[in-house]
Amino acid sequence: MEILVNLHPMTEQQPTILVVEDDMEMNELQCELLALHGFASVPAYSGTEAIEHHCNGTIDAILLDVMLPEIDGFETCRRIRENTARQVPIIMLTALDTEDCRKRGFDAGADSYFVKPFNPAEVVNTLEMLLGRE
């Protein structure tokens, strides 16, 4: 019989992270990473889906890709930030690695910006800091 040990036991209020990534495999990997660190996750595959989830008020933070179908991550971030009633931390995870892209991300309202391939521990640490879990 196999016994599984949860290194990060669930708390009463497990933060839910919206993972916005159109690559299904990458989305799944990010969700698995979050689960290993005690987070719940909700996958989204477009900017439109991200905005809908944000408006529903069920998420605590967002991992946001930039190159998305329908609405890119910069515009998605800007639209989410326009909803002043629900401000959640937004971490951009993208392949775009120019100073201009970083500036656009922060100007749109991102709290942090990581370039793929990113260091998973750094992303989790940043997420925990932004959520006040450290």
Image: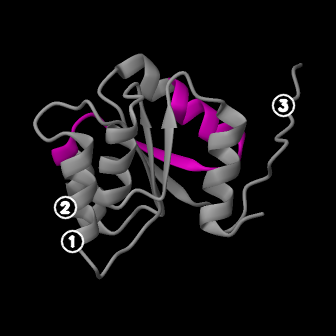
Q: Residues within 10 Å of mark 3 (few under 14, many from 20)?
A: few
In the image, taking residue 111 as reference, residue 37 lies left or right, namely right
* Residue type at tag 2: Arg
- Name the N-terminal-most of marks 3 and 1: 3
Q: Disc 1 vs disc 2: Cβ atoms closer than 8 Å?
A: yes
Residue pictured at 27% horizontal, 34% vertical = 45
User: Where is the N terminus found, in terms of image quarters?
Assistant: top right
The image position of residue 97, as x and y in percent, is: 42, 28
What residue is pinned by disc 3? 4
Residue pictured at 40% horizontal, 38% vertical = 99
**Nearer to us in this view, 95 or 34:** 95
The image position of residue 57, as x and y in percent, is: 33, 69
- The magenta-colored residue range is 29-48
Alpha carbons under labels 3 and 1: distance apart: 43 Å
What residue is pinned by disc 1? 82
SS for tag 1?
Answer: helix
The image shows residue 3, relative to residue 124, as above or below, that is above
The image position of residue 117, as x and y in percent, is: 54, 21
What residue is pinned by disc 2? 79
SS for tag 2?
Answer: helix
In the image, taking residue 4 as reference, residue 41 lies left or right, namely left
The image position of residue 40, as x and y in percent, is: 55, 49
Q: Is residue 47 visible?
A: yes
* Residue type at tag 3: Leu
